[in-house]
Each structure stands twice: as C-alpha cells, then as structure tokens.
Image: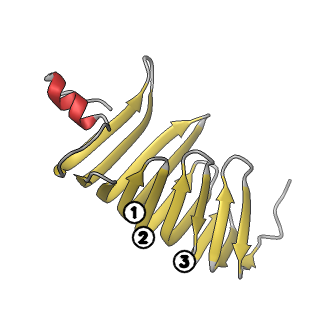
C-alpha cells in the first residue's frame, strides 16, 4: 500500500494489514499496488471499513494489470479476509480478452485464482453468451464449470 500523505510510522504500521484492535473507517480510498518501475493495480472504494475480522469496501472498483492482461472488477460491496474476496451486489468482471462476467455475488480465492458464484450469472466472450445458475471459473486454466447453462454461441466466426 502507498500512503503518500502519511509519513508518521504509527499510521503506516496501523494500516498495513496487521492486527487491528479497533474499527476504523476511511473515505474516498485509492490504493496502488506497485513495484519499483510499474503500477500493477489500482483499487478504489468510496468507503473502507476495517474490522478486526475483515475489511469491507463500499462501491469497490479495481484495475489490475498483470501478465499483459487488464482486469476490471467492480461491485456495490466487497469483503476481504485473508486470501478470500467476496463481491456483493452488481459484481462485474471484464478483461482485455473480451471476457465479461456479471452476477450478484462472487467469491474469489487469491491463492487458487478461482472465482465461484451460486447466484445467476451472465458470462460473455466476444459474441458468445452463457447464462447460468452457478459457476466455478479457474483463471489459470481458463476453464468454467457451469450449472444449468443456456448458451448462445456465434457460429460464423472466421479463424
């Protein structure tokens, strides 16, 4: 995390994700993930509530740039606890490979790179569209496991 306005060591230690003994709230939050040469991600939220067990983000938005791919994520609320991210309310994912995903709730594991939803969803890739009741999507393998799917596949694609 980058705290450009804070140079006091007490605050940077408090905000870096260590043990939290009290609840806190921050408004209009922008957080950058970066190394010495490049920004890898930008995370934004209208409100960030930090609790002892989890973090809650209101009006969450993220742009992630990794492996020559751009990932855009947004939701009404997001919850983070360890390596698990829960997106609730208008959860949306899009990338620069023309893949979009919409659902009401999505759970993503940062360890396994797998997203799941048990709520109705729409998955679109180029002109192809899949609507289903539940989904498990592996971002590493680029494979989806879908329950009760209805698919519209574009047939006249040139190779």
**Mark 1 falls on what kind of element?**
strand
- Looking at the image, is 121 positioned above or below residue 32? below
Say the numbered circle drawn on residue 119.
3
Q: From where the camera sits, is residue 125 visible?
A: no
Between 74 and 49, the one nearer to me in the picture: 49
User: Where, by quadrant of the figure, is residue 91 drawn?
Assistant: bottom left
Q: Position of residue 87 (x, y in %)?
A: 43, 62
- Looking at the image, is 127 positioned above or below residue 79? below
- Looking at the image, is 123 positioned above or below residue 98? below
Q: Badge 3: how crowded within 10 Å, few (<14), some, or many (20+)?
A: few
Instruction: Tell whether label 1 touches label 2 (CB within 8 Å).
Output: yes
The answer to which of marks 2 and 1 sits earlier in the sequence is 1
Residue for point 31% across, 48% down: 44
- Looking at the image, is 20 positioned above or below residue 117? above
**Mark 2 falls on what kind of element?**
strand
Q: From where the camera sits, is residue 153 visible?
A: yes
**Disc 2 target residue:** 90
Give the label, 3 or 1, closer to the camera: 3
The answer to which of marks 3 and 1 sits earlier in the sequence is 1
Task: Give the distance between the C-alpha atoms of the residues marked 3 and 1, in whole angstroms.
Answer: 14 Å
**Mark 3 falls on what kind of element?**
loop
**Disc 1 target residue:** 75
Between 97 and 51, the one nearer to me in the picture: 51
């Amino acid at each position: 995390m980058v705290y450009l306005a804070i140079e006091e060591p007490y605050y940077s230690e408090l905000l870096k994700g260590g043990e939290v003994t009290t609840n806190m709230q921050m408004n209009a939050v922008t957080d950058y993930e970066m190394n010495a040469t490049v920004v890898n991600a930008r995370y934004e939220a209208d409100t960030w509530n930090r609790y002892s067990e989890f973090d809650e983000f209101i009006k969450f938005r993220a742009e992630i740039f990794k492996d020559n791919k751009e990932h855009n994520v947004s939701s009404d609320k997001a919850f983070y606890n360890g390596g698990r991210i829960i997106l609730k309310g208008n959860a949306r994912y899009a990338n620069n490979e023309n893949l979009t995903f919409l659902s009401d709730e999505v759970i993503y594991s940062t360890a396994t790179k797998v997203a799941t939803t048990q709520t109705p969803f729409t998955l679109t890739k180029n002109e192809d569209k899949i609507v289903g009741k539940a989904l498990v999507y592996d971002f590493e393998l680029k494979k989806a496991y879908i329950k009760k799917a209805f698919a519209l596949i574009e047939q006249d694609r040139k190779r």
